[in-house]
Amino acid sequence: MTLILATRNPHKVREVARLLAADGIAVEPLPEHVELPPETGATFEANALPKARAAARALGRAAIADDSGIEAAALGGAPGVRSARYAGEDASDEENLTKLRREAPAGSRLRYVCALAYVDAEGEEHVFFGESSGRLAADPRGTGGFGYDPAFLPDDGPDGLTMAELPDEEKDAISHRGRALRAFAEWYGQAR
């Protein structure tokens, strides 16, 4: 079975395809002509579901979409649902990370959160969640991953290594998106 992945983020397309391939689930990127609604929800779930609904409705096929981000305890949970736009609407990953490091102290608690929505052509909906806790590194390190990964020290990862320093297999095992996708794949395997 091939699902549509309702995102314009090429990093997510590669990561989700890699993670679901082990379960025999293929993903296709969203066709250019399909418009996604803006992410205006107050929760990750409220942003993920409309994207999956829009893709499923436009294409008449099952679609998945996620919304994910990072929450800093020192900032009251910010940037949260604004993680991709933390330093501005068109901010780069580097600009967002720089802003987080400027505002939150090194060593402070962080939590990655992912809500993954599934909507099929008939309108059946399910949402799966994953999270990963850690702390903010003093300096960004590593070339793997994307977003805030270079400064995220996972609690359940190898001591002292950021998410961006981990091989894909190790990152996938403990990441918020990896956990949400494994929950989805388990359900999907039983449901079909």
Image (tube, rainbow, N blue to C red):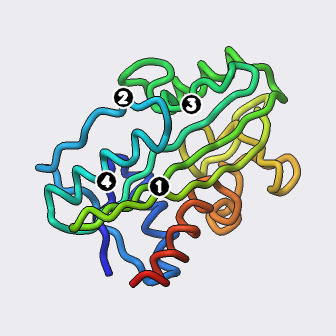
- Element class at badge 2: loop
Task: Report crowding for label 4: few under 14, some 14 to 19, many 20 or more residues within 10 A (C-alpha).
Answer: many
Name the residue rendered at 15%, 65% in the picture. 60
Check disc 1 and report its element: helix, strand or loop. Answer: strand
* Residue type beneath disc 3: Gly
In contact (CB < 8 Å): disc 4 and disc 1: no
Q: Residue at x 17, y 57 (%)?
A: 57
Q: Where residue 91 sits in the image (x, y, percent)?
A: 42, 24
| Sequence-first disc among 1 and 3 | 3
Residue at mark 4: 52
Labels 1 & 2 near each other (Cβ < 8 A): no
Q: Earlier in the sequence, mark 2 or mark 4?
A: 2
**Amino acid type of the residue that numbered disc 2 sits on in the rendered structure:** Thr
On-image quarter of the C terminus: bottom left
Badge 4 marks a residue whose secondary structure is: helix
Q: Disc 2 marks which residue?
A: 40
Label disc, if present, on residue 132 of the rendered structure: none
Do labels 1 and 3 touch, CB within 8 Å? no
Q: Which quadrant does the N terminus fall into? A: bottom left
Q: CA distance from mark 1 to mark 2?
A: 16 Å
Which residue is tagged 3?
Answer: 80
Tell me residue 110's x, y (percent).
73, 35
* Amino acid beneath label 4: Ala
- Is the residue 133 above or below the residue 179 in the image? above
Report the side of 175 relative to 19 (left or right). right
Q: Is residue 7 left or right of residue 150?
A: left
Residue at 68% x, 65% y is 173
Q: Report how far apart the C-alphas of labels 3 and 4 lie in the structure.
A: 20 Å
Element marked by disc 3: helix
Q: Which mark is residue 116?
A: 1
Mark toward the start of the polypeptide (3 vs 4): 4
Query: What is the residue that sits farthest to the left in this orientation?
Result: 33
